[in-house]
Amino acid sequence: MKIGQPSDLPAISPSQTGAGAAASAKANQQSQGAASTATREASSATSTASVAVTVSAQVRSMAQAERAGASAVIDMDKVNAVRDAIENGSYVVDPEAIADKLLANAKEMLDRSRG
């Protein structure tokens, strides 16, 4: 619920007439003014807040390795040969070779993080 909404303001009863009603209305206006000033100050303080972020050396080295790999040359003859073998159904997957490469890559990453 926002401050200064009609539901926040006390209702003036018929018995509150004259000076009592004027004093009540003036008090409501002052509280609304103070609330809007507080809201403006809070929003300006929020917009200037910032958070410092640091990147670890491991992440920087991974990003550098990724950039170096992006410039690697692609052997299109080999790509086309593999594509043709897949289309012909003659491409053979060697699960042991894949498992060995995965384990070697995992070991290399662990060695880098420890060193």
Image (spheres, grey):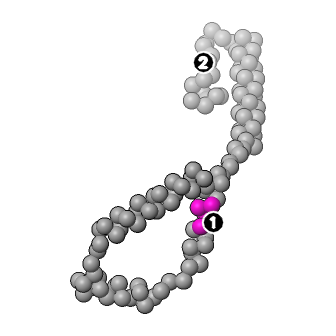
Mark 2, residue position: 11
In the image, is residue 64 part of the stretch drawn in magenta? yes
Residue at image point 41% right, 87% down: 78
Q: Are marks 2 and 1 in contact (CB under 8 Å)?
A: no
Local secondary structure at mark 1 = helix
Mark 1, residue position: 64
Q: Which residue type carries mark 1?
A: Gln
Q: Does the rendering let one see residue 29?
A: no
- On screen, residue 17 versus residue 8, left or right, reads right
- On screen, residue 74 versus residue 29, left or right, reads left
Q: Position of residue 46 (x, y in %)?
A: 71, 39
Residue at image point 64% right, 59% down: 60
Q: Report the front residue among 25 and 51.
A: 51
In the image, is residue 90 part of the stretch drawn in magenta? no
Is residue 75 shown above or below 53?
below
Name the main secondary structure of what is drawn in magenta: helix
